[in-house]
Amino acid sequence: MAKGSDPLILLGDMNRRTLIAALAGLPFAGWAVAGKPPFRLKLIGGAPDGDGYLAGVAVDLDQGWKTYWRIPGESGIPPMFDFSKSLNVKSAEILYPTPMRYQDQSGETIGYSHRVVFPLRVKPTDPAVPVKLDLALFLGVCKDVCIPVNGRIELELAFRSPDPGEQRDVDMWLARVPMARTDLVGAARIENATLILDLAQPADDIFVESATSAYFRAPRFSAGGLEANLAIDGAVNPSQLKGSPLTLTLRRGESGFVQTVTAQ
């Protein structure tokens, strides 16, 4: 990374608190439990993107294993991406594809199974010089036990033709990153430790993020799918969420949409 650049450790305060809480309750295991690592990590290159590059962090998982979204659910480990040792990197923005919700012995978790590629938008400090990505990655992969993964992977990017297969992979997962909308959720209100949302169209699932430790459980739909009720856990006084911004990710199939609302 260029001298004077800020470290690109892309994990917010909310996720740090979630990580600490999650680590306390997970059944961790060493490598010997699986015999061999149940995951593969790789940085893959995409197409040039304006004055920068597209790339991706590919995580392949064995059958039955999963890893987590930035809000992992009742338990789990939010991923951490540190590009601070990269060369000629002005910024590296990690993007999260729309996740799935799972039910297992740990309760509700939110993330990905089998395979996920986290798309990456990279801006070089000097566009005339190749970029060298150096990623220190921390994530959890879980099945009956959880394995904390500390990985280090590298990739050099330059203005050249990317590998066609890798480019298609990045593009496919980039299409799964939620698109910003302002018209999918109308009224949002909190009643009796429940977030109630009026929807313009039905959704398969809704994931809610706030600046607090509150966890919003899987929605229960009514009114033909146009009302969603999400029970709120982990908040001492859920009514204090009134007037605060909530980020909603609505999933429909493999597509996602994101909208910020203020609950009344």
Image: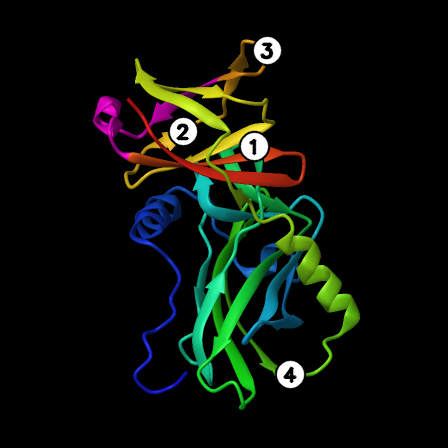
Q: Dot 4: few (<14), some (14–19), or many (≥20) neighbours within 10 Å?
A: some
Q: Look at 37% across and 58% down and name the residue there.
A: 11
Q: Which mark is residue 104?
A: 1
Foreground tag (2 vs 1): 2
Element type where label 1 sits in the image: strand
Q: Is residue 91 above or below residue 119?
A: below
Q: Earlier in the sequence, mark 1 or mark 3?
A: 1
**Quarter that holds the C terminus:** top left
Q: Look at 52% across and 48% down and name the residue there.
A: 68
Query: Residue under circle 4?
Result: 159
Q: Earlier in the sequence, mark 2 or mark 1?
A: 1
Q: Nearer the viewer, residue 85 or 223?
A: 223
> x, y (%) of residue 36?
66, 62
* CB under 8 Å between discs 2 and 1: no
Residue 186 sits in which quadrant?
A: top left
Q: Which amino acid lies under the numbered mark 3 shown in the image of this protein?
A: Gly
In the picture provided, is 55 more to the left or to the right than 163? Answer: left
